[in-house]
């Protein structure tokens, strides 16, 4: 099942920066070496998470019930539907009602969480428990859950992004397989687009960056970009991947009717998380999305056949087809908690226990976040879901790196991409250089 507000992560990350910074002065910075609570003593943990749908909340409760059965001395008080703003307010206030364990959708703020010491470093807990994180978690997931060696969070399920498409519309247009390269993607998107006056009956793809999950970061991943240089400075202008992606996306926008016409059509779309999503209604034939879209479409009662595939890659990187952008949920321990040893038992169970991870993934249709869970025979795998498992396993799948400014650098890049697709910026290399300067300034201020 989806998590409400996935596409709002970046804007949420910006609002979090000041709040997280304020936490730095109030956090104790305890670790496994200094936490003094007895994990075998009777204790109640406060666990806060962001899931809100009934099926998601039940999946959490079921996992907690299994944990409590295995740890009879630890009781867990669960509070769901919590935003990061509320979590940070509670962490600043402290006290018995503040969360001991937190699950967040805001992976883009991991750098800030770690840098400010709002969450405890989990490396000592991992070492004390004999858990080799490199053998438990995929490399990319470890990259977005740590910052500068501080593993202040761990992965709790995984999101992979690919292509969800209308097989019935493909067949009607004489298309026999999903596109694998960008040039094929453009050709297929044009074949599937049916103009209707100054609007459309159907577009092959909504290519604009406001189109739900069609963000600059999702597309850039297909070019295997390097966001920052070895010296830590922004690398957008130096890496040709960014200019190539922006140029390719702008060209696709023009070939499908232009920015203004597409945006007018996009403004008729239903809610991303509702039954009237444009993929469900047939307004778009291909959708850049995550593993949750196919089951959502089926639940909405679509009458067409659904297919899934990896996103196309640049023609010159055809050998790397199958890769994609990865993200997910994170889980950590509040640095100010006086129950960190007990809290670690919960985090360890939720994030590393294969049965727990598989059960949670099955319940909410997300990709598992451990290597063992990805291969578990208990994982329920449909043909549509297998695509996203394969993307998660692909050695060249990537994510956006954690930085001290949280996700602000991504917002800066995203705003520039908006200007490019709209036609407000024509000199992409010069604009990327200016964007680099802004990102470097913001990161310097955040440190």
Image (cartoon, helix red, strand yellow):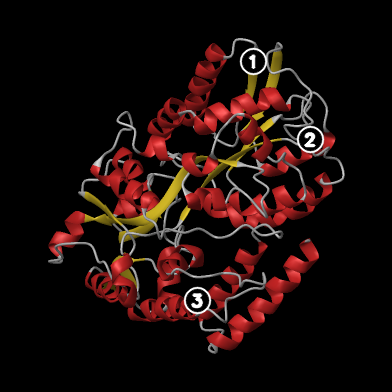
Residue 43: % across, % down: 71, 15
Q: Give the Cα distance between marks 3 and 1.
A: 49 Å
Q: Nearer the viewer, mark 2 or mark 1?
A: 2
Question: 54 and 216: which one is in front?
Answer: 216
Q: Residue at x 63, y 83 (%)?
A: 433
Callout in the foreground (2, 3): 2
Q: Is residue 284 visible?
A: no
| Residue annotated with mark 3 | 242
Q: Which residue is mark 1?
A: 75
Q: Position of residue 413 (x, y in %)?
A: 59, 71
Q: Is residue 322 left or right of residue 352?
A: left
Residue at x 77%, y 49% (from the top left corner): 116
Q: In the image, is residue 336 above or below residue 417?
A: above
* Residue at (64% x, 70% y) in the render: 412
Helix, strand or loop for disc 1: strand
- Quadrant of residue 219 in the image? bottom left
Q: Which residue is mark 2?
A: 30
User: Can I make out residue 400 in this image?
Assistant: yes
Tell me the CA gap for discs 2 and 3. Answer: 40 Å
Q: Measured from the top left, where is residue 61 in percent x and y? A: 52, 22
Sequence-wise, the earlier of marks 2 and 1 is 2
């Amino acid at each position: 099942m989806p998590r409400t507000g996935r596409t709002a992560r970046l804007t949420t990350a910006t609002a979090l920066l000041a709040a997280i910074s304020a936490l730095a002065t109030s956090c104790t910075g305890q670790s496994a070496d200094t936490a003094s609570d007895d994990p075998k003593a009777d204790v109640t943990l406060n666990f806060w998470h962001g899931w809100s749908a009934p099926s998601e909340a039940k999946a959490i409760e079921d996992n907690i019930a299994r944990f409590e059965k295995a740890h009879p001395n630890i009781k867990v008080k669960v509070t769901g539907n919590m935003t990061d703003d509320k979590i940070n307010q509670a962490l600043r206030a402290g006290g018995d009602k503040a969360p001991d364990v937190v699950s967040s959708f805001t992976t883009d703020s991991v750098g800030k969480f770690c840098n400010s010491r709002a969450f405890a470093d989990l490396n000592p807990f991992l070492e004390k428990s004999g858990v080799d994180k490199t053998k438990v978690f995929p490399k990319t997931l470890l990259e977005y859950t740590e910052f500068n060696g501080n593993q202040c969070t761990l992965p709790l399920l995984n999101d992979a992004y690919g292509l969800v498409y209308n097989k019935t519309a493909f067949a009607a247009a004489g298309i026999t397989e999903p596109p694998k390269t960008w040039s094929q993607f453009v050709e297929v998107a044009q074949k599937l687009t049916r103009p209707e006056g100054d609007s459309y009956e159907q577009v092959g793809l909504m290519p604009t960056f406001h189109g739900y999950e069609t963000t600059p970061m999702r597309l850039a991943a297909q070019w295997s970009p390097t966001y920052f240089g070895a010296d830590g400075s922004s690398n957008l202008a130096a890496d040709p991947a960014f200019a190539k992606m922006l140029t390719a996306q702008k060209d696709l926008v023009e070939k499908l009717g232009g920015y203004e016409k597409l945006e007018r059509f996009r403004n008729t779309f239903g809610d991303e998380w509702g039954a009237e999503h444009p993929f469900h209604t047939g307004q778009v034939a291909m959708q850049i999305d995550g593993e949750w879209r196919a089951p959502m479409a089926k639940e909405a009662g679509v009458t067409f056949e659904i297919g899934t595939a990896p996103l196309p890659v640049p023609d010159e990187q055809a050998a790397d087809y199958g890769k994609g952008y990865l993200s997910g949920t994170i889980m950590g321990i509040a640095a100010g908690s006086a129950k960190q040893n007990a809290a670690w038992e919960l985090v360890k169970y939720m994030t590393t226990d294969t049965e727990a991870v598989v059960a949670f993934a099955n319940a909410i249709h997300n990709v598992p976040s451990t290597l063992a869970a990805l291969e578990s025979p208990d994982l329920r795998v449909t043909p549509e879901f297998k695509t996203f498992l394969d993307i998660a396993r692909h050695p060249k799948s990537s994510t956006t790196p954690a930085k001290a400014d949280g996700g602000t650098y991504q917002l800066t890049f995203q705003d520039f991409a908006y200007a490019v697709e709209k036609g407000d910026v024509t000199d992409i290399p010069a604009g990327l250089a200016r964007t680099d300067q802004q990102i470097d300034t913001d990161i310097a201020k955040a440190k």
